[in-house]
Amino acid sequence: MVEFNPQEPGTVTAQASSTSTDPESSTANNTGAVITVFIAPAPAPSIAGISPTSGPVGQTVTITGNNLANATAVIFNGQTGSDDDVTVTPNAGGTNTSVSVTVPVGVTFGPISVKTPGGVATSTQTFTPPFALTSFKPANNEMTVARNASVVLSFSQNVPTASAARIRVFSSQVGSLSQAQVVVNNNVVTITPAPFYFKPGETVNVVVPNTVVNGSGQAISNPQTFDFVVATENGTASFGGAIEKTTNANPANEVLGDVDGDGKLDLIVTNYGNGSGTTISILRNTGTNGVPNFANKQDFSVGTGATGPYNIAIGDLDGDGKLDVVTSNDATNNVSVFRNTSTGVGNIAFAAAQLITVGATPYGLFIGDVDGDAKQDIATANEGGNSVSILRNTSTGTGNISFAAKVDYTVGGGPYGVAIADIDQDGKQDIISANSTGNSISVLRNLITAPGAFVAASFATKVDFTTAGFPVTLGVGDLDSDGRPDVVSSNNRGNNVSVLRNISTGVGNIAFATKVDFTVGTGPAGIALGDLNSDGKLDIATSDYGSGGTTGGGNTVSIRLNQISAPGTITAASFGARATVTVGSGPNNVLLGDLDGDGDLDIVTANQGGTGNTTSVRINATSLPPQPLPVELINFVAQAEGRNSVSLTWATAQEKHNAGFVVERSTDGKQFADLGYVAGNGTATVRHDYAWLDDKLPAGVSTLYYRLRQLDSDGTATTSVIRTVSLGAATAGFQVFPTSSVDGKLHYRFTGAASEDAYLDIYTLTGQYLGRRVVGTLSNGAVSVSDLAAGGYIVRYTSGDKSYASRFFVR
């Protein structure tokens, strides 16, 4: 018998041997005979077509053609699919075959090839994998993200720098990170917060819109929005340090945000006036060295035709990096939109409010990107219309804020509160309302497939979930650390909160477990979720308004600390016993934020009841001294001083192991050279100012680029954003004379009208800040420098929005 199993064309030679045990049959078994068999070559494969010609990782692709039997590999433009994913299916005729394969990770645009024993066939058609976001961090709903954490986005294909710039990171307390450092490394985009780090306890929203494209101009196939929460540190949930600040009549709600860009959270309050108010008040945070303080109120009108500003929200509506303000005016059924025109620290200003019509009695208000176009939209809960109004942001750039007309969606009875969150984890923001008379929340699932005008089909029909009595406001966050946002309602007539655990199982499946109620104070009106004791879990705080109608009568904030030990369960034991913090009379809302810069969450309330007309601040007693972060730049400014010099100034909010800064300059924005070094202040928790004067400019250039390379004491380095400077004509706006002081005075002259708060800042030549001399409207004068040692210095004169720098010497 001869046995062989041919696999390749050619000849096979075998020697026959007897297998019989019968000696009489030996004549039939000529052992030793040689048998030669010729094996014909396997036929060459060919490909007739591929289907589909585009698809994501995991998509099954079928290749049809001839002689595809015994295929050993399918190759996508050089990328081989997993052997486990290749199957061969003969066609009915038997001569043609089809090969099915699962698209592997890393596929790029190009033809598909099939390898068989007969050779390799390549398709004339090309396969186009969709351009997609493949991973991101921080994770969706991650709870303890570091303040200086970068957002890292990985894509299936390379991303042009201009395309990456369309991604938006929205800080709820600072605004969009317009000066963020964006680094593109092929298919990975890294966004580092700047000029400030994230704020403790705040929610950050990241939007990857469908305008992000690959190098071929192909739009992303899975635009995404996701949220994360910034970690707190050293909180004890023990509160003191009472501060009471005066507002106008009946402050109903307020928000915390850095309005003037100084790195500190300011208070913005609605002066409801029990329906007749017409203003908001801003109280600027003037605290220093970790001690909170606030300036007296600064009022702004909600606009002619607007009355009863009840709720308030903030967001960067025109993408300029500044927080704009919106109020919902329940007496006039509209919202007031205030564009932030502040020009610097301490200079808070807003353009006149523009009014936009919404539904009847808009008590609830929320700002967020509903359609995924990287612009923040407005949602109101309309108690008088049983609806939610959505205003789509149609702004076209800095200074141009506009919204499309409202589109209304039906929710449950008497909606008081509204929130936006991705409940089913499909990368789209859904709408949630608190329905006071319906004793429920309504969820509207987002069905938008691409940015554009909102229509009836943009959201699914509401789905209701039961709460306790008269829910008025909502808190949304991942309470049990399972990666899904849960919902908490404050129930004004139930004197409790209802916790609804998110048990949604996937895209399109929105579900919540039966509510679990927790007792708080009488008449809870406002609610906030935040990590008050810095254990990595969201706690619950409510403002207990009381039962006295317009007077309230309550004066406490209730706190229930999160004691959940494992994801997936919320029971009656999940939150600790009620603790209270005393505040002003009739607190209608409660906010959490780091007002003193120590890393933990403090409490703020707007006290609508009674006649006190105040906002209360209570400070969280930190368990340890504040821990500074790596260097946090407050600002970095490069400014031409005519054509002969460029002045650089920057400031840090805090520093950790900061050895110093290397000042770098470039003529093309790509290749940078060192100019000099400015020593840092090591580890510090207070502001430090620095400066550098570049008065040795290269000849023949009209544009220069500057950046800072910050050095840690361990040798690691971080580069700042790049500042571009256009060199203008020579100017004599500011002069010092003589440039050498011999009489202990610095003489100066400013050409122009000086502002009342004009001042001179003095630095060493190595950039160390020495102090300020306020000169006011005196544009031609002298200040004492007798306290300065002999040597060279830099002086910067600032008047309003104009600033100039020069060198001088003390002899």
Image (tube, grey):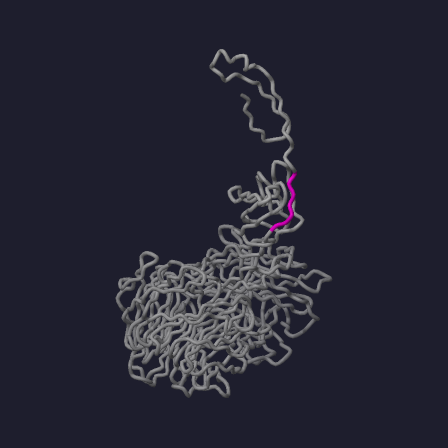
Q: How many labels does the image show?
A: 0
Is residue 362 at all visible to an observer of this figure? yes
Farthest-out residue, right? 700
Q: Quadrant of the C terminus?
A: bottom right
**In this view of the protein, which residue sits in the foreground, 610 or 195?**
610
Q: What stretch is highlighted in magenta?
A: 44-50
- Residue 778 falls within the magenta-colored stretch: no
On the image, which quarter does residue 399 sit in? bottom right
Q: Main secondary structure of the magenta part?
A: strand
**In the picture provided, is 778 more to the left or to the right than 556?**
right
**In this view of the protein, which residue sits in the foreground, 386 or 43?**
43
Measured along the vertical axis of the image, is residue 235 above or below residue 21?
Answer: below
Residue 528: horizontal and vertical position, in percent? 37, 70
**In the picture provided, is 625 more to the left or to the right than 40?**
left
Farthest-out residue, front? 24
- Residue 49 falls within the magenta-colored stretch: yes
User: What residue lies at 40% left-to-right and 86% top-to-bottom?
Assistant: 275
Residue 297: horizontal and vertical position, in percent? 44, 81
Residue 780: horizontal and vertical position, in percent? 61, 78
Residue 461: horizontal and vertical position, in percent? 44, 71
**In this view of the protein, which residue sits in the foreground, 196 or 568?**
568
On the image, which quarter does residue 558 sit in? bottom left
Is residue 419 at all visible to an observer of this figure? no
On the image, which quarter does residue 678 sit in? bottom right
Measured along the vertical axis of the image, is residue 275 above or below residue 326?
Answer: below
Measured along the vertical axis of the image, is residue 10 above or below residue 419?
Answer: above
User: What residue lies at 61% left-to-right and 20% top-to-bottom?
Assistant: 35
